[in-house]
Image (cartoon, grey):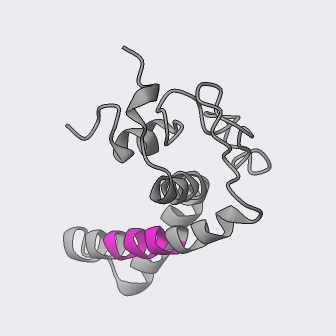
Amino acid sequence: MCLTKGSKFYSIINFKCPQCHEGDFFLHKKNWKLSKITALHSNCSNCNLKYMLEPSFYYGAMYVAYALTVGIAITVFLISNLIFALELWESFIAIIVVLILGGPINLKISRIIWINIFVKFDKKHLKK
C-alpha cells in the first residue's frame, strides 16, 4: 500500500524524513505563517540525515512548485468551467483564489517532493 512507511507518498503526506520516515521535516508542521512556512530542521532527529544536501538545494523545488501550480490551475479551470459552468473571467478568479490560498501548502509539498526525488528510504532505519 502506498500510505505505509517505505513509500515516498508516506514521507510527502506526513512531512517526514525521506530516509527513515520517522523524523519531522519541517520545524513548524501546522504553522502557516509565511515567515515560518519553509523552515526546516537542519538534520533528521532519528537518522541524522542532513536536509540541506547542498547550498541552494531547494531552488530546484521551484520546478516542482511550478508543475503543481499548473496542475492545480488546470484542474480548477476544468471544474469551474465544466461542472459549475462559470464564465471565463469567473473561472480565472477561482483559479487565482485557489492558488493564493493554496500557496503555503504548495511551498511545503514542493520541498518535500524535491528531497524525496534524491533521497531513498533506508529499511535499516525502520522501527519495528
Q: In the visual, does 65 lie left or right of 84?
A: right
Pick out the residue farthest to the bottom: 88
Residue 43 sits in quarter:
top right
Q: In this rendering, is residue 50 above or below 87?
A: above
Q: Residue at x 42, y 41 (%)?
A: 121
Residue 96 shown in magenta: no
What is the magenta range? 66-75
Q: In this rendering, is residue 67 above or below 5?
A: below
Q: Which residue is drawn at 80% across and 49% down?
A: 35
Q: In this rendering, is residue 14 above or below 108?
A: above
Does residue 94 appear anywhere in the picture? no
The quarter of the image holding the C terminus is top left
Pick out the residue farthest to the top: 128
Residue 89 spot, x, y in % from top left: 44, 84
The quarter of the image holding the N terminus is top left
Q: How many marks?
A: 0
Q: In the visual, does 99 lie left or right of 13?
A: right
Q: Residue at x 65, y 32 (%)?
A: 48
Residue 5 spot, x, y in % from top left: 35, 31
Does residue 86 appear anywhere in the picture? yes
Q: Which of 44 and 25 is in front in this view?
A: 44
Residue 73 shown in magenta: yes
Residue 67 sits in quarter:
bottom left
Q: Which residue is drawn at 36% across and 69% down?
A: 76
Residue 94 sits in quarter:
bottom left
Q: Nearer the viewer, residue 109 or 77?
A: 109
Residue 85 spot, x, y in % from top left: 24, 75
Helix, strand or loop: magenta stretch: helix
